[in-house]
Amino acid sequence: MTEANAVQDAARDLAPVYRDLHAHPELAFQETRTAAIVADRLRALGYDTTTGIGGTGVVGILRNGDGPTALLRADMDALPVREETGLPYASTAQGLGGDGQDVPLMHACGHDMHVACLLGAAAVLAADRSAWRGTALLVFQPAEEIGEGAQAMIDDGLYDRFGTPAVVLGQHVAPIPAGVLGLHPGAAFAAMDSLHVVLHGRGGHGSRPEATVDPVFMAAATVMRLQGVVSREVAGGATAVVTVGALHAGTKGNIIADRADLHLSIRTSDPAVRDTVMAAVERIVRAEAAASGAPREPDITPTESLPAVRNDPAACARTRDGFAADLGSVLVVDPGPVTGSEDVGIFADAAGVPCVYWLLGGADPQAFAGAQDMQALERIVQSLPSNHSPQYAPVIEPTLTTGINALVSAARTWMPASG
Ligand SMILES: [Zn+2]
Ligand SMILES: [Zn+2]
């Protein structure tokens, strides 16, 4: 069997698995069906397979002689989003959300593609063991979307039980053209901090504002003022995002509520910028509460915090050279730093080894037909549904084949057959 055939066979085999995973999304730490499919396939391929790591995580190990260990990682969880792709394999699934409410479920971030690609790479690595030497440590991680899965697997003894890798490798599907990879050395994915803010007012009748402290007005002023943090306090060349993604207050037009709840998501790439932004957000929230005459101080509670993903530059160069040698037809671009966040860096930080994490193009290449330059390409990327959108779904091909090829290439680069 030739190399190209092994990848083609894996991609053909995994396309229905991808559609099945897409139709059956599962929320963070509830990925039991997905984990069972993964474990069955890994066992059938001869991987030493363990389930239930860090909750619902799966580890598959293939030992192939003396040599380095490379960790290849895919995340498995989906999101509480109602799918609107109109695809024949679109999800209609419902599940139990964090607050105990029924929520629609969708693989709106493409983690189903990550799983299918890594299963494909598992098959290709098992099929041709003469092309690499070492230990392939395949990690199928739960709960990336809530930023807890990687840490849960580390805390469950991932490295004590299965050994420490020499490198952490992985990919995330993105709305760049399928058949293209994006690899940025340095700060590749932003740090994320999520905050829950409660602004306290004094409730009362909607006809008597003088007897109340209106938290809706306080929240509106806070949201507007927070948008000055990035534009007025962060240098033009630095990267930061402040998003108020949720704002809840009140029940009825003639009732002034007694509190407003805000949920913020903050992205930064540089620790000093992060400190500046976090301090500014707290200062503004407290100052707007004081400006309204709030009866008490606001509550500001951090709910999630993820470090930035730093791609090791030397390790990126080595991996990229491997892509160039193995994937002649695949274009590798530098997308610059991404403001999205990821917990994959936790695997590398915990092992003290380099991380190489790239973007896997998932957008229909036909959407880019006629684009003459980078600016035209970027305009098209911005017009396409992004990850987490109800319309987001990668095209299966050439995404799946490219993703399998990229993982196999990176694995062989870090576990060379000779040397
Ligand atoms: Zn996501
Ligand atoms: Zn994701």
Image (tube, rainbow, N blue to C red):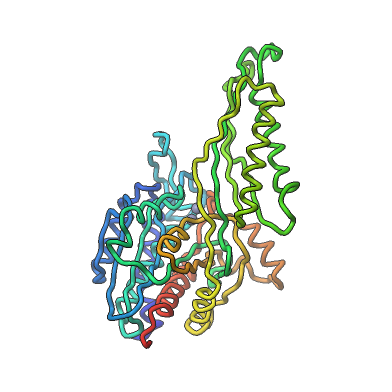
Percent of width and height locating residue 103: 43, 39
In the image, residue 359 lies at what x, y percent? Answer: 53, 66
With respect to residue 287, does 72 lie above or below? Answer: below
In the visual, does 325 lie left or right of 69? right
Q: Is residue 90 or residue 97 the one in the foreground?
A: 97
The quadrant of the picture occupied by the C terminus is: bottom left
Tell me the residue at 73%/47% (across/down).
Answer: 233
Q: Quadrant of residue 218?
A: top right
Q: Residue at x 38, y 53 (%)?
A: 142
332 vs 398, nearest the viewer: 332
Residue farthest bottom in this picture: 418
Which quarter of the figure has residue 336? bottom right
Q: Is residue 78 shown above or below 361?
A: above
Determine whether 417 is above or below 69 in the image: below
Quadrant occupied by the N terminus: bottom left
Residue 10 in picture, x, y percent from top left:
36, 73
Q: Residue at x 58, y 67 (%)?
A: 186
Numbered marks: total: 0
* Residue 332 percent location from the top left of the image: 57, 75
Looking at the picture, tell me which residue is in the foreground, 388 or 20.
388
Q: Residue at the location (35% across, 67% down)? A: 164
Question: Which quadrant of the figure has residue 48?
Answer: bottom left
Q: Is residue 382 left or right of residue 39?
A: right
